[in-house]
Image: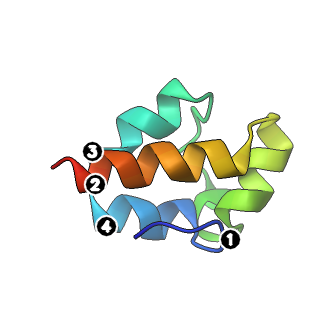
């Protein structure tokens, strides 16, 4: 299960398929140094993305695998 306290790097380790959802939401810098340094909530704030909505999409993707 994905949560807002996980880093992008941790999320990608759960399932590489989450990259498509992250990029589709506006996070195009998955390989940047901040992907391992800031949590999803912080990254969403920087990119103007609703963190709760993104977490819901990611967990829905994982549940339907």
Mark 3, Cα crowd under 10 Å, few <14 / some 14-19 / many 20+, is: some
Quarter location, residue 49: top right
**What distance separates the C-alpha of mark 1 from that of mark 4?**
17 Å
Q: Residue at x 82, y 34 (%)?
A: 48
Could you say where residue 13 lies in the image, as x and y percent from the top left? 33, 67
Q: Residue at x 55, y 53 (%)?
A: 55
Residue beneath label 2, please? 62
Circle 1 or circle 4, nearest the eye = 4
Circle 3 or circle 2, nearest the eye = 2
Asked if residue 9 is positioned above or below residue 5 in the image, the reply reads: above
Residue 31 versus residue 20: which sits nearer the camera? 20
Give whichever of discs 4 and 2 has the lower sequence position: 4
Give the label on residue 17, or none: 3
**What distance separates the C-alpha of mark 1 from that of mark 3?**
21 Å
Residue beneath label 1, please? 37
Mark 4, Cα crowd under 10 Å, few <14 / some 14-19 / many 20+, is: few
Circle 1 or circle 2, nearest the eye = 2
Quarter location, residue 29: top right
Asked if residue 20 is positioned above or below residue 64 in the image, the reply reads: above
Residue beneath label 4, please? 14
Could you tell me which quadrant the N terminus lies in? Answer: bottom left
Could you say where residue 10 lies in the image, as x and y percent from the top left? 45, 70
The answer to whether marks 4 and 2 mark residues whose Cβ atoms lie closer than 8 Å is: yes
């Amino acid at each position: 299960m994905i949560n807002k306290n996980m880093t992008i790097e941790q999320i990608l380790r759960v399932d590489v398929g989450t990259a498509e959802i992250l990029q589709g939401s506006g996070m195009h810098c998955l390989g940047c140094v901040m992907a391992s340094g800031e949590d999803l909530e912080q990254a969403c704030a920087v990119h103007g993305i609703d963190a709760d909505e993104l977490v819901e999409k990611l967990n829905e993707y994982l549940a339907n695998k």
